[in-house]
Amino acid sequence: MFLNRQNSFLFLILAVSVGYLVSAMSLGAPVAESGLTPSFFPILVGAAAILFSTILIVQNRRETSGKTVSDAPRVYTHLWVIAAIFVYIMAFRTVGYFISSGLFVFALIVIFSSVEKLVLKAVISAAIVAICYVMFQKLFGVRLPTLWG
């Protein structure tokens, strides 16, 4: 079946992502003669959301081509993601950006993949957190909370 619950949700996410990108593009040009403008990051996020939701739709179509809905095991990934977001929000100010974001990214990677190669996943999490820190601190000038003040 082409439009089961999961496919419907993925198409909804794709539609919302397209709407977000269209509204982000109305903010103006992402790059000006002086460098990046405030519209750069929302446009980047919208384009990435469209790309990733399209990839998820294609992957889902390939996986479910021979499988019925009743064959799939019941997974509560959405509840684990909500719990991770809640813990992240509560820990952000207390323990700072690096620890809370590192654990959050690591948790999301483990939630959406298998519990194997944990060292590699920890390195990837640290790299993502470091890149985001540089982007927000240096590029956007946003001071993030740290454990040391």
Image (cartoon, helix red, strand yellow):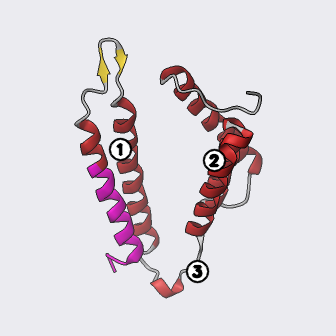
Residue 67: give x, y in percent of width and height. 46, 81
Q: Which range is magenta?
A: 1-19
Q: Residues within 10 Å of mark 2 (few under 14, many from 20)?
A: many
Q: Pick the residue in front: 129 or 74.
A: 129
Task: State the residue at coordinates (74%, 41%).
Answer: 95
Q: Name the residue under label 2.
A: 105
Closer mark to the observer between disc 1 and disc 3: 1
First in sequence: mark 3 or mark 2? 3
Q: Name the residue under label 1.
A: 46
* Position of the N terminus by quadrant: bottom left
Q: Gap between marks 1 and 3, in whole Å?
A: 31 Å
In the image, residue 100 sits, relative to residue 8, either above or below, namely above
Q: Point out the residue furthest to the top here.
A: 34
Q: Is residue 14 left or right of residue 112?
A: left
Q: Which amino acid does label 3 sit on?
A: Pro
- Label pair 2/1, CB-CB below 8 angstroms: no
Task: State the residue at coordinates (38%, 68%).
Answer: 9
Q: What residue type is labelled 1?
A: Gly
Q: Pick the residue in front: 67 or 143.
A: 143
